[in-house]
Image (tube, rainbow, N blue to C red):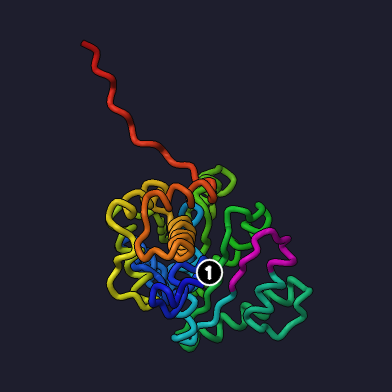
Amino acid sequence: MYKAFFGLISNPFNLSPDPAFLFRSPHHEEALANLIYGVQSRKGFIVLTGEVGTGKTTMLECLRDHLDAHQTPFAFVFNSRLTPDQFFEMIAYDLDLPCSRKSKTEVLFALNNLLIDRANHNRTTVLIVDEAQNLDWDVLEEIRLLGNLENRRGKLLQIILAGQPELDQKLEQTEYRQLRQRIALRCRLRPFNAAETAQYIATRLARAGLREQHVFPADVLEDIHRRTQGIPRLINSVCDNLLLTAFAMEKRVTTTEMLEEVSADLQLQWALPETPAEVRL
């Protein structure tokens, strides 16, 4: 709605996980490099965690693009509320295994044959599980057993578990110690600091067609960071609504008053700055 008004060619703050808009902050760059390294080096288990809205799914989309570009087959489990049978059925569909997808035994035989064949050609295969903090014990145990498939050169199946910090907490429990010991790499996404928040907003605007960021003044950027706590999803939501508000008011620069209105509409909660103690004479 506001694209033409601000000279944009696309929506800069879409909430969908578009790899084209990935902001490569140092820790996001490091996390993506670790994911790719873990897959290429056949490390087996890799865990990616981060608070809600910090960009885990976007990171996985970038990894999927990398796997597609290198013709590496992968299964992507995006719904973690599954029974073991449903889990194996999803793997069979994603990898197009030539078997009865309703039979766990047949899926395992077909998967093993695929992995061995690819290993013989020095290739690997990847299993990505998003929202892994919701996995039940029996499904996580099946995933652990899949991690036992290996040869002398390394693991035959690279398994990436992505989830919220609750995943780390779950893996620390005693009953998951066998799986925890198999984790070769851990990546953690954190919220942006104030400088990264400003860079993130400017980068997304530039990729949407606005090369020089002048819509959000320095005081507004600082306040956006404080109110969103540097979480990319919240930053997108706030900035999108700010642009819409400015467009409705026919203003090309946002203000803290607009941000107050948007924050109230989105019901944002944030820590207020501390007030200096009153000096008593």
Horizontally, residue 196 falls left or right of residue 175, namely: left
State the image coordinates of residue 155 (x, y, percent, origin top left): 48, 71
State the image coordinates of residue 266 (x, y, percent, origin top left): 53, 50
Instruction: Identify the residue shown where x is 68% and y is 79%.
Output: 93
Of residues 121 and 210, the one nearer the viewer is 210
Which residue ends up furthest to the top in the rendered image?
281
Of residues 102 and 129, the one nearer the viewer is 129
Residue type for callout 1: Ser
- From the viewer's perspective, is residue 72 above or below residue 246? below
Instruction: Identify the residue shown where x is 32% and y is 67%.
Output: 202
The residue wearing badge 1 is 16
Which residue ends up furthest to the front in the rendered image?
250
State the image coordinates of residue 167 (x, y, percent, origin top left): 53, 51
In the rendered image, residue 81 lying in the magenta stretch gets the answer: yes
- From the viewer's perspective, is residue 227 above or below residue 49? above
Residue 82, visible in the rendered structure: yes
Instruction: Identify the residue shown where x is 51% and y is 46%.
Output: 264
Write down the quadrant of residue 278 in the picture.
Answer: top left
Q: Which residues are magenta?
A: 76-87
Horizontally, residue 167 falls left or right of residue 274, namely: right
SS type, badge 1: loop
